[in-house]
Image (tube, rainbow, N blue to C red):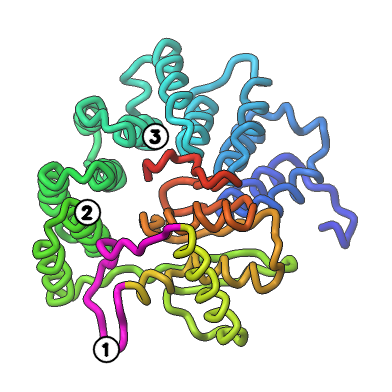
Amino acid sequence: MKNENIQGDSTVFILLIKACANIRFLSLSQSIVKQIPPNFLADHWLQRSLIDMWGKCGLVDEAQRVFNRIAQPSIVAFSAMINAYGLNGKGKQAIELFHQKRKTFSMKFLMRNELKVSMPIDCFARSFQFDRAQHLIDEFEKDHSPCPHMYMTMLSSARNKKDAVLAQQLFDRIRLLFSDEKQILSSATVVLANTYGLSGNLARTSDLRTKMAESGLKKVPGRSSTIVNGEIVHFYANDRSHPLSEKLYHQLDQLKDELIQHGYQVDESWVSRPLVDGETNESVLWTHSERLAIAFQLIQNPKPSFIEIVKNLRICQDCHTAIKLIAQIHQCSIVIHDANRIHHFDLTGKCSCNDYF
């Protein structure tokens, strides 16, 4: 369109914004927003799309700025802003805005779709307010079919609390409700195995891994994407397909040595599958896709100020711990967009999720 000197209308920019929200890379989104004519910014649907995009790209303050400019936010704008808060680790603000929305719209109206309910459930579960989260699920299911995302959110939080009893109860519920959905069952089995491992029951963890392998359930391979010189580069777990693989794995070894010097210890409970010949728990964890993407960025620029990665799965706790240290040691802000939320790792070694992931 630019080559033919055609000016896009608000609908074109809404579609572009939605595409950017799906891709989630900040630099690409900023390049599109710079091209939006100022007179389009008052469009209600474009505003809602911008809130959603900024939230998914990790700029929650920019999402809030757009939201605050709306005189009378619709339920869609409220939902987009609550989602932006929740994705970026601002659970308190998400819950406060959810209560504000309840004062404006009836509960029955709020329960019309799962997006409007999922984020407050996520916020309650992450703060271990399981009864309040379950209450919202029960209200939602009075008029809707069960939503797997809501139960996976609860299961992940039970894992973070190392509550194996609750995790088993939730897993049993997931297996009952979604018995035909293999990907959900696979993910739930992995989280349950992690929970038993974290709670010290390694025998149960091993048993679940074996049963998962025997049943034919397959864990979705982890894939992380990052941008280098304007090009999106993809890495899979244990990936050796890149032309710079030798340098990549040398950089990984250097990172591991740095982290060990700063007190890092591998958490083997996060290995979610049986080992094959030649593998160790450490080697499996250190070749997770997000670590490969970070190592690749450090090859391209040994002293980066910012690294951004998009991952198709949730980050594991061992990677989370490692990346906090990498950000601190290299004095580099790192943003990981995983399947559930956005992790902002700052220069002090802290993450925006406050370790609720």
Mark 3 or mark 1, earlier in chain: 3
Relative image position of residue 74 (x, y in whole percent)? 53, 22
Residue located at (47% from left, 80% from top): 239
Residue located at (44% from left, 17% from top): 101
Q: For mark 1, what is the residue?
A: 277
Q: Residues within 10 Å of mark 3 (few under 14, many from 20)?
A: many
Q: Is residue 11 above or below residue 303?
A: above
Residue type at numbered disc 1: Asp
Mark 2 or mark 1, earlier in chain: 2
Q: Residues within 10 Å of mark 2 (few under 14, many from 20)?
A: many
Instruction: Tell me the quarter of the picture where residue 4 sits.
Output: bottom right
C-alpha span from label 3 to label 1: 42 Å
Residue located at (24% from left, 41% from top): 161
Residue 113 seen: no
C-alpha span from label 3 to label 2: 26 Å
Residue 119 tag number: 3
Residue type at numbered disc 2: Leu
Relative image position of residue 315 (x, y in whole percent)? 41, 56
Disc 1 is placed on an element classified as loop
State whether the magenta stretch is mostly helix, strand or loop. Answer: loop
Q: For mark 2, what is the residue?
A: 198
Instruction: Say which quadrant the C terminus sits in.
Output: top left
Q: Residues within 10 Å of mark 1 (few under 14, many from 20)?
A: few
Relative image position of residue 251 (x, y in whole percent)? 57, 75
What's the magenta region?
263-281
C-alpha span from label 2 to label 1: 25 Å
